[in-house]
Image (tube, coloured by chain):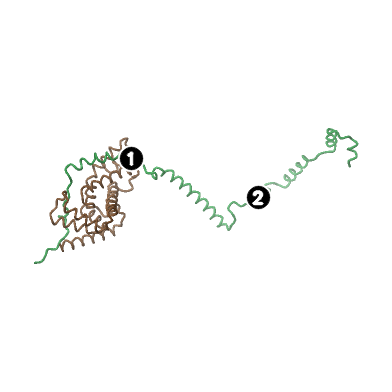
Chain colours: A green, B brown
Amino acid sequence: MDKKKFTLTDEWKQQVFTTPEGYFEGLQERVTARITGAPRMSWIAALRPQLAFALAFVALVVVGYGGLHLLNSLQGDTSPALAIDEDYTYTGVLSGLDENTVLRVLSEEQEHHTVNTGDIIDYLADVHISLTDIASLD
Amino acid sequence: MTDKELVQLFHESDNPNYAFNLIVQKYRERLYWHIRKIVISHDDADDVLQNTLVKAWQALLDFRGDSQLFTWLYRIATNESLTFLKSKRTKFFLPLVDVEKQLANKLADDPYFDGNEMQKQLQKAILSLPEKQRIVFNMRYFDELKYEDISEILGTSVGALKASYHHAVKKIEELMDVD
């Protein structure tokens, strides 16, 4: 006689395990007894906002530096990003002024530093140097 | 109350115990039967379920609703069950197969098993499956979970789960035929 082939139909889904009576009702109490104090937050969760802020800052710095670096390399400048062309700076500043203004400023500066002979004689007299000594000086 | 409302109540209420009790009430039986089918004995299932709920309580503050609450709880329950079996194996220096054999033997003397001889044979056939395949089979066949939910719980692709379930059914039917 042929043995009937076993097929896993829904009839085998029937619950075959049982529990002691009132098990689920008492479970709540046992779990509550094991839970003491407030639920705690893991250190990662507690630090999440600060970590996010720090990561955002690092990302900003990296992107900023990368952008500057990229800009420099696109301009064909292989020197550090903040290098300054000195000649360019002087000519840049002076290019905003006309020639007469520059000459006037320089001559005023010279006037300020000019000392006449009278001032020198007065000074030497103040420090008690005789006129003969002064006259002996050429 | 929906899962979302329960989680919100837990996060915002002055009494998170109340919200947690509601969650336990809602899911205790589903989680118990899931665990029970993995560890077989009632006493072990009770221990693992309690550990699962304590872990859930501790971690619920971190739960932000990226996944469904029930798949999140199932994941904890599955991990706790697997950890339990692993600790059993390490404790008694048993290879994988022997643990399953032990579970099958337990089934024979279990006072909380209410099935007939054929149903006992079916449970033994299920126990002969590789551990992960057995869990996939239980979740799909008995708990009737969607593959998408099982995928979220186990972190395995839907395609792999379908193949695993197909192999499990085939193997169980073959074993039951021989017996």
Residue on which the image places disc 1: A39
- Most distant residue in the front direction: B92
Instruction: Point out the frontmost of discs 1 and 2.
Output: 1
Given the image, what chain letter belongs to the residue carrying mark 1? A
Horizontal side of residue B12 vs A12, given as left or right: right
Callout 1 crowding tier (Cα within 10 Å): few <14, some 14–19, many ≥20: some
> Foreground: A50 or B132?
B132
Q: Amino acid at mark 1?
A: Pro
Residue at x-position 29% and y-position 59%: B160
Horizontal side of residue A6 vs A85, given as left or right: left
Q: Callout 1: helix, strand or loop?
A: loop
Q: Amino acid at mark 2?
A: Thr
Specify which label sits upstream in the sequence, 1 or 2. Answer: 1
Badge 1 and badge 2 in a common chain: yes
How far apart in space, not on screen, are marks 1 and 2 (Cα)? 64 Å
Given the image, what chain letter belongs to the residue carrying mark 2? A
Say above or below: B14 vs B96.
above
Residue at x-position 51% and y-position 50%: A64
- Most distant residue in the left direction: A1
> Foreground: A67 or B122?
B122
Q: Quadrant of residue A11?
A: bottom left
Judge whether residue B168 can be spotted in this image: yes
Callout 2 crowding tier (Cα within 10 Å): few <14, some 14–19, many ≥20: few
Looking at the rendered image, the quarter that the C terminus of chain A falls into is top right
Residue at x-position 29% and y-position 57%: B158
Residue on which the image places disc 2: A89
Q: Quadrant of residue A135?
A: top right
- The image shows residue A100 at horizontal and vertical percentages of 74, 45
The reply to whether dot 1 and dot 2 touch (C-beta < 8 Å) is: no
